[in-house]
Image: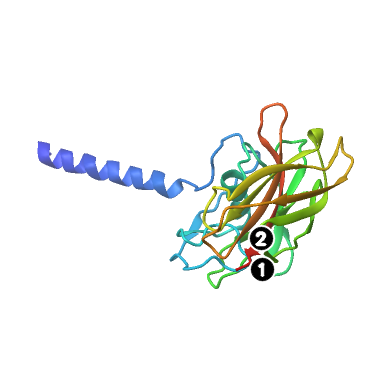
Amino acid sequence: MNKRSALITTAVVVIVFAAGLFAGRQWGQHSSTTTSVATTTNVTTTTLANQPTSAIWPFASTPTRFATPELAAQTFVLDYLGFTNPVMEPFQQGDTRSGEVPVRSSLNGATTTVLVRQVTSDDSWWVIGAVSPNIVLATPTALQAISNPVLLKGTSTAYEAVVNVQIRQDGSLAPLARTTFMGGSMGVMGPFSKTVTYAAPTSPAGEIVMYTLSAKDGSVLEASVLRVAFAK
């Protein structure tokens, strides 16, 4: 084999090897210490002009779509909520196109239940909300049109009673508002009432994101996420 042929053969081997590595990479697998990691690849489709009415994640403006509910839930808690090493539990089927995935921030952590559904014709999976038994929002309700400022009312329990809250809009992780409220503490649920003023959104819908943080390292412990519309 001459020198030129040898170089061409080497280049082909490198390209094939690199392609194999890329094909095996799973979008959303951020930590090797995650207790349970989804193993199927994402489905890529064309982007949508608008976010589906009930869907929070993925962002419709990106081509990323998920073939399994587990991968949709896993990337949501990692990339949208900021969990560090989530413990993923098995998908629990609801009807034929929906269900939920329980997630904990650690083996003994509180459970955040991620609600998932196939909301588009390509049968990909989307996150439509998340609930924690320790952060319960009574007002507003899901898909309600909220005005600015918005009054949040419900019950909660958290370390030193503090719950963090953000108002976000579709397609962005940057909050329109960021603040805290206080409810119950030490495992005892207590009422909260908080009026939140937020920057003018540029999209018709978004989310109320409520979460607690670890006193030890500041990591996210649990969260409740409610999808809402913005009143015109």
Q: Position of residue 193 (x, y in %)?
A: 80, 50
Dot 2 alpha-carbon crowd within 10 angstroms: few under 14, some 14 to 19, many 20 or more: many
Query: Mark 1 or 2, which is nearer the eye?
Result: 2
Quarter holding the N terminus is: top left
Residue at 50% x, 47% y: name it: 26
Q: Position of residue 156 (x, y in %)?
A: 82, 45
Quarter holding the C terminus is: bottom right
Residue at 55% x, 73% y: name it: 121
Dot 1 alpha-carbon crowd within 10 angstroms: few under 14, some 14 to 19, many 20 or more: some
109 left or right of 59 in image: right
Q: Amino acid at mark 1?
A: Arg
Residue toward you, 120 or 165 = 165
Q: Which disc, if any, is residue 97?
A: 1
Residue toward you, 3 or 112 = 112
Tag 1 near tag 2, CB within 8 Å: no
Kindly report the distance in space between the C-alpha atoms of the residues bearing marks 1 and 2: 19 Å
Which image quadrant is residue 163 in? top right
Q: Amino acid at mark 2?
A: Arg
Q: Secondary structure at mark 1?
A: loop
- Residue found farthest to the top: 216
Residue 110 visible in rendering: yes
Mark 2 lies on residue:
227
Residue toward you, 59 or 22 = 59
Residue 104 visible in rendering: no
Question: Above or below — where is 94 with respect to 196?
Answer: below
129 left or right of 13 in image: right
Q: Secondary structure at mark 2?
A: strand
Q: Position of residue 157 (x, y in %)?
A: 83, 41
Residue at 66% x, 60% y: name it: 227
